[in-house]
Amino acid sequence: MQSIGLPTSSLYRNSDSKSFSFLLHPAVLIAIVILFAPTLVFAINENGLIVVDVVTDPSGSSQVFEFTTNYGPPFMLSDTDQPIVSEWLLPSSTAGTYSVTEAAVAGWDNTNIDCRGEGNAVENPAAIDLSAGETVVCEFINTQRGSIRVVKQVTAPGSAEENFAFTGTGPAGFDFSGGFTISTSANQGIFTNSTDFTNLVPGYYSILETNPVQNGWILASAACSGGDTPDFINISPGEDVTCTFINAPLGSSTIIANSVGGEDVFGFTWGNETNTNVPEGESSTFTLDTTGDATETRHFNHVHIPNDQYDLKQTGTPGTIGDYMKSWVLTQLVCIDETGDTLVSPGLNGSDVTINSAANETVTCTFTNTLDGTLVIRTETEPNGIAVDFNFNGSVTGLIRDFSTFFEELSITGQPADGPYTAMETVPTPTNWRLDDISCVGATASIVTIGASGGFEPGDKNISVDLAAGETVICTFFNTLPNACHTVSVTGVIETSEASYEACELLYVESFTAEAGATISLSAGTDIVFGPDFLIEQGAELNANTCGLSLCEVSLSPMPYGCHSCVNQICDIDPSCCDVSFDQACLNKVDTVCELVCE
């Protein structure tokens, strides 16, 4: 409700009732009525008034708005000012319609204009039809726009400048310019940057940070002032809202493969049927090749969701290597985790390790694979080629013969940590062999101990080897038969006539050809061994005789039946010189004729 008086009086607005009153001293009012009664009555009855008021949302703003009219000079008015009352105006029937216009102000919207005259009739502010004696009140309602400040904060530095992307929506299709980014500088520690969106009409807005994980970050928190959330921001008139998005770098891991005793390619797998987590943007499998320097490192930088569990298992262990079938064994797995929540050996779900990396934390895990070592045992005999089994006990067990002739050996392959590996030669049959030496080769990092003192001494029969990874240590036991009869080897011979070859122990006839017309006599004390290239052509004659025992064996026991003639045939000795067994004189004669040494 409004009460209107004379325009020359004092006008005030009751801020609660929006009513207007004129205050005059009673004596003054009586004088005016007596002196100007005719004119006053005419003005009240024939002229009108236009009153302009400003109302702001939020209420009580001191923002000044400029008005222009066609009935008076421009004026400025705010919500805190008293309404502006025009001079007495002739009715529109005489002077035409009146207008009042408010100029636009940045950050404000004129959301309503309410002009009402006599009888609460609505008037158009651009064409006010003022009647005689009428007062028209025009109320301009202005609504202040708001703003949103988007603050980006990172809790730790990144390795490079990072652009964080956002999208959003608002009233009337507002989309924050189709999306926007906020950049952070590299290596700046805790860093804050922001961007402002001003001049926003009141209403509901939403802002979303688009997948920071793919760029190595996690959204740690997002909140807005005034209790709003980024996905539901209610901008009231004149309200300034700040939304803060805090990002932390994703966790990282460093995987190292070390190989001891060799170099190879090792395969690894992230995840399993139970836990399918794979670092962001990474393949579930990868390899590490230690070729060159026995190590390789793979960095998984900022790809672990903080406090998520990632199972990792070495799944690609190379196959066996070399003649002795050496294998790789994962011998050590060590992880460095500052927060201490990584599970190692075993991890969860059958994995080797379950990595749990906090924000901006790097967990380093080192897989060490060790290649087996091998211990090989061989024997050599003097004379060589004698078919005698030598027995070994210890880590290496079994019977072997002369390696040079029969290519027999014993071996054991295993991890260095399972050592030391041992071997001991036991007395063979017959017992008159003598172990003269033990020699080991191939020990670069391996530690070989022969006998009790470390080096061979007469009477030593055993070895102990601390194998180094990947090494093959070959230990040869050299055995001698004292007073052994000579062994004769015939090779690369072509005979065309009569020829004889004799040996008091073993006769080896390897590459040998007897052409037609040749007569060949072969005699040996124990055996005649023919090689693959032994050839007797048609028309050639071969006579071969063996005694069955060596002369040294004969000298130690009574002559077996038929051996006398054998000795006679071989050595041209009359066995009658020895009635039951060879005496010293007979042995001397054997020595003289056959160059034998039998003691």
Image (cartoon, grey):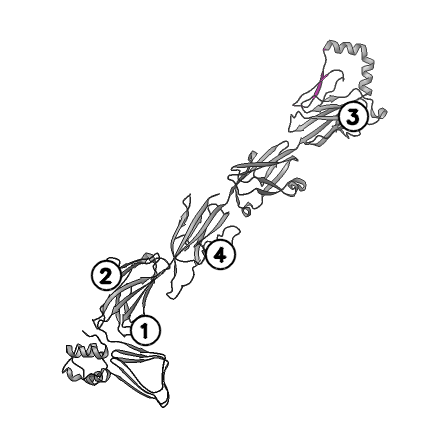
Label 1's element? Answer: helix
Magenta highlight range: 7-25
**Position of residue 547 in the picture relative to residue 184 (left or right):** left
Query: How many C-alpha atoms fall within 10 Å of the one at disc 4: few (<14), some, or many (≥20)?
Result: some
Q: Give the number of the disc on residue 285.
A: 4
Q: Which residue is mark 2?
A: 457
Q: Which mark is residue 301?
A: none
- Residue 542 locus on image (x, y percent): 31, 87
Q: Earlier in the sequence, mark 3 or mark 1?
A: 3
Three-letter amino acid code at the position of disc 1 = Thr
- Quarter of the image for residue 71 reads top right
Q: Furthest residue to the right? A: 94
Mark 2 neighbour class, 10 Å CA radius: few under 14, some 14 to 19, many 20 or more: some
Picture quadrant where residue 79 is located: top right
Residue 9: within the magenta?
Answer: yes
Q: Mark number for residue 69? A: 3
| Tag 2 secondary structure | loop
Which badge, 4 or 3, is on the more N-terminal residue? 3
Residue type pointed to by label 2: Glu
Q: Is residue 263 visible?
A: yes
Question: Which sits earlier in the primary sequence, circle 2 or circle 4?
Answer: 4
> Residue 437 or 5: which is nearer the viewer?
437
Sequence-first disc among 2 and 3: 3
Q: Which badge, 1 or 2, is on the more N-terminal residue?
A: 1
Residue at figure coordinates x 81%, y 23% from the top left: 132
Closer to viewer: mark 3 or mark 1: 1
How far, Cα to Cα, is label 2 from label 4?
56 Å
